[in-house]
Amino acid sequence: MLLCGVCDNLISMIKFRLLLAMSLLYLGALPSMAQKDLKPGFIIKNHVDTINGFIDLGSNFKNSKACRFYQSADGSAEVFHPGEITAFRIENSKLYISKEVSIDSIKQTVFLEFLLSGIINLYYLKEPNVDRYFLETDGRMIALSNEEIIGYDEYGGKYAYDSNRHRNVLAYLFKEYPDLVKDVQTIKLDHKPLIEVAKKYHYEVCEGEECYDYTKSMKSNWFIEPYGGVSLSWLGLENSSDKAQSVDPLVGVNFRFASSRVHYLWNFVTGLKLSTNNFSGDFKAAIYNEKLTTYRIDAKYAVISIPLKVEYYLPIESFQPYLSIGYTNTFLLGSEYEARKVWNEPPMVGPAMETKFQPYHGGIVIGGGVRKALANKNYFYLNCEYEYRQPLVNTRYILEYINVSSVNFTLGYAFNK
């Protein structure tokens, strides 16, 4: 019987791996749909003509290199590079201005995201591994940077620390305003604090005149992601190397929040996952003393999980890989369980032990996957996660010493809201 069970599990795993491989092939063979995320917007030609149409919104890095403009949603793209047009704007989102700046001592023209217009203008440039900000005042472009500085200690050990050069630049610029100089001593190189201090400076210098914050009109992106898959789970007992396995289908839905500014990099994810577990096995463990005792554990229940995760996406087109980590809240409902002691000599199974089964488990989840972008920001995604959970309450009943490890494989589809 044991051999049959192992064979059945092996066959199930082989079938699932075949299904997984076929899913990957299917995603790769999807019709070559244009990787477009068209949004209403406009371009401003160098002779100040404004042309309305649609713009293919990409990452900040892509947008800094080129603007893909469509006069109609079903038309062909006109690609404009920095210097060929003055600016382009996506409705309810970002404004990009063509500017010449010095990057790593090399002058180049790029599209900078316009953050704030006032007595000083604030711009942003996202590169794969660097956030760059620029202030424009009196016709000059001033770079704000925070590069790492490499140092060595007295023993020759190497260490790195932030230069915080942007603070010195801002302190010099605001030198006539002591309160602002104090504010920038600890300021971070990020959108919100830089916009706030630039606004304060504007209203100090230009009292009664408005400045314009272009980030206020930016919307955040919400995605709804239904999915289905399979969960391979193992029940463990503290101080025991024995495991009981359960292979179960799962379904769920994720709710994904993506910042308008960095939606292609950092996401926050929560949702609801439904599954079941059905465990049965013998476990040798020293729970209450140093003597090994065999416990026969049977547990069957429904699983409702609510994850809280952050995900990081690599800035790669088409098939986009990502990594995730988070905390999972797991509720076990409709539980049927028992634990018994087992003796080998003489062979005997004891009566059901008095025990408790905790309905709430907490744990961690780590995973990754890949998504295939479609039109209108929708996408397919394939995900694999490792999850570990255990009861957070232990009043020394045997079933409060259990833990569950799971590997979950899911395939889903995302709708942009």
Image (cartoon, grey):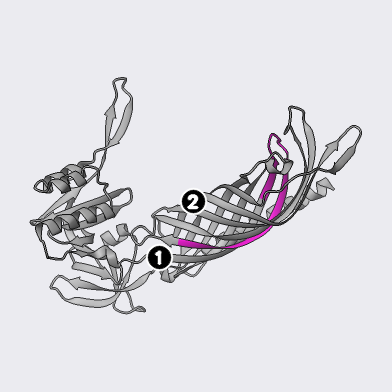
Front-most of residues 334 and 345 = 334
Q: Is residue 72 left or right of residue 417?
A: left
- Choose top left, top right, bottom left or bottom right for residue 88: bottom left
Residue at 85 percent across and 48 percent down: it is 1
Helix, strand or loop at label 1? It is: strand
Q: Earlier in the sequence, mark 1 or mark 2?
A: 1
**Position of the C terminus by quadrant:** bottom left
Q: Residue furthest top?
A: 155
Q: Quick one: SS at disc 2?
A: strand
Q: Position of residue 329 (x, y in %)?
A: 57, 52
* Residue 36: percent from left, percent from top: 38, 69
User: Which residue extends farthest right?
Assistant: 346
Residue 351 tag number: none
Instruction: Name the disc covering residue 221, or none.
Output: 1
Magenta stretch in the rendered image:
233-256
Side of 35 where 18 appears, left or right: right
> Furthest-front residue in view?
395
Q: Amino acid at mark 1?
A: Asn
Horizontally, is 381 left or right of 204 in the view?
right
Please, is residue 20 above or below residue 398 in the view? below
* Residue holding disc 2: 324
Q: Is residue 245 magenta?
A: yes
Q: Quick one: 277 or 245, which is closer to the camera?
A: 277
- Kind of residue indicated by mark 2: Ser
The answer to whether residue 78 is visible is: no
Q: How far from the left and from the top, in percent, is residue 338?
A: 79, 48
In the image, 177 versus 39, the foreground residue is 177
Q: Is residue 35 above or below residue 159?
A: below
Q: Main secondary structure of the magenta part?
A: strand
Q: Is residue 7 above or below residue 39?
A: above
